[in-house]
Image (cartoon, grey):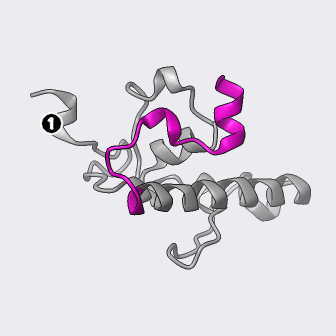
Amino acid sequence: MAKCDEGYRCDVCGEDVTSIVESDLYLRFVIGHLDPEKLHVAPERHLRCNPVLSQCIRDERFDEIEADGPFRLSELDPKHAADMIDLVTRGYRRLWEIIETENDRDVTEYPLPEVRARYQ
């Protein structure tokens, strides 16, 4: 069976990642933390299975979580933490835009505008 027919399994918990809005892979792609050439081979995770990234989401559709350890937001430089919250939140909202508009959109249009500009 082809990978696309199998769906995407979370590299952490092993369960299916059933929606783009719960996908760590696509969030990283949208915010520019994943090279487009590696999208098809990079591991997938649920957002909740990557607390270092998902702790930065500030949106009413996502229950806030906290990461433990040295990458916890409170342990980071405040300016860097604020920048990450802004970027990751905008990326998360972009995932919702994608799912709420066209399901058949060209994947090269997924990233945030400033990320798309870097790739052009």
Q: In the image, is residue 102 part of the stretch drawn in magenta?
A: yes
Amino acid type at image mark 1: Asp
- Which image quadrant for residue 8? top left
- The residue positioned 33% from the left and 56% from the top of the image is 19
- The residue positioned 51% from the left and 39% from the top of the image is 109
Q: Position of residue 1 (x, y in %)?
A: 9, 28
Residue 58 vs residue 106, the one in the foreground:
106
- The residue positioned 64% from the left and 37% from the top of the image is 32
Q: Relative to residue 41, is residue 94 depicted above or below? A: below
Q: Relative to residue 39, is residue 46 depicted above or below? A: below
Q: In the image, is residue 80 part of the stretch drawn in magenta?
A: no
The span picked out in magenta is 99-120
- Asked whether, in this view, residue 14 is left or right of residue 64, the answer is left
Q: Position of residue 110 (x, y in %)?
A: 51, 42
User: Badge 1, how many Cα within 10 Å: few under 14, some, many 20+?
Assistant: few
Asked whether residue 29 is in view, the answer is yes
Q: Residue furthest bottom?
A: 60
Q: Relative to residue 109, is residue 27 depicted above or below? A: below
- Asked whether, in this view, residue 99 is left or right of residue 78, the answer is left
Residue 43 vs residue 74, the one in the foreground:
43
Quadrant location of the C terminus in the rendered image: top right
- Name the residue tied to disc 1: 5
Local SS, label 1: helix
- The residue positioned 63% from the left and 45% from the top of the image is 112
Q: Position of residue 102 (x, y in %)?
A: 37, 53
Asked whether residue 22 is in view, the answer is no
Q: Position of residue 80 (x, y in %)?
A: 85, 52
- Which image quadrant for residue 33? top right
